Image (cartoon, helix red, strand yellow):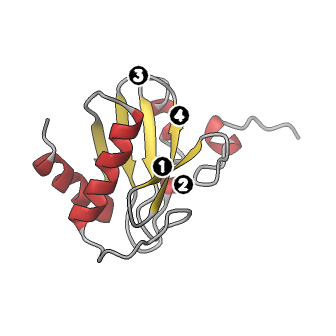
């Protein structure tokens, strides 16, 4: 039986060596993946067991219109936890460091759970 696989099924998000990057933010290396071109859109996953792959159904479509920057929050997946106490401000600082490394443009932010709270901090602290 032949089946058609979508891009979401072909890509292994969160461990894609072709799209993956590391950024040293001082006390930790933050892992992120980029897909597509255009205005940046940052994806911030949830806490506890969350990871980049939670956006697997959205990245293919978003990457047709945006430069998707899917960030692994500290202590998740391939990102190091570092030595600074974890806070939502720290997660927001990591995300802005990644954005500045990837683009000079402002970004759309999508996040949920811990990633959603970090997105609120990003919007409040880095509203430009």
Q: Do callouts 3 and 1 mark residues in contact (Cβ within 8 Å)? A: no
Label 4 neighbour load within 10 Å: few <14, some 14-19, many 20+ = many
Q: Secondary structure at mark 1?
A: helix
Give the residue number, with chain letter if any, for mark 3.
Answer: 38
Residue 118, how many percent across, how many down?
25, 58
Residue 24, quarter of picture = bottom left
Side (left or right) of 38 relative to 120: right
User: Which residue is identified by label 4?
Assistant: 35
Q: Nearer the viewer, mark 4 or mark 1?
A: 4
Report helix, strand or loop for mark 3.
Answer: loop
Residue 124 can be seen, yes or no: yes
* Depth order, front residue of 50/71: 71
For discs 3 and 1, the disc positioned in front in the rendered view: 3
| Residue linked to disc 1 | 55
Labels 4 and 3 touching (C-beta < 8 A)? no
Tell me which corner region of the image, top left, top right, bottom left or bottom right, holds residue 6: top right
Asked whether the residues under the numbered discs 4 and 1 touch, taking CB atoms below 8 Å apart as contact, a structural biologist would say no
Q: Residue at x 38, y 57 (%)?
A: 25
Q: How far, Cα to Cα, is label 2 from label 1? A: 5 Å
Residue annotated with mark 2 = 53
Picture coordinates of residue 109 (x, y %)? Answer: 29, 43
């Amino acid at each position: 039986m032949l089946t058609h696989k979508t891009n979401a099924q072909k890509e292994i998000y969160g461990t894609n060596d072709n799209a993956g990057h590391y950024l040293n933010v001082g006390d930790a290396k933050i892992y992120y993946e980029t897909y597509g071109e255009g205005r940046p859109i940052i994806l911030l996953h949830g806490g506890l067991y969350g990871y980049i792959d939670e956006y697997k159904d959205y990245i293919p479509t978003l990457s047709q219109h945006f430069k998707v920057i899917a960030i692994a929050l500290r202590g998740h997946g391939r990102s190091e936890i570092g030595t600074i106490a974890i806070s939502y401000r720290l997660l927001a600082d990591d995300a802005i460091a990644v954005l500045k490394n990837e683009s000079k443009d402002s970004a759309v932010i999508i996040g949920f759970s811990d990633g959603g709270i970090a997105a609120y901090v990003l919007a409040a602290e880095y509203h430009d």
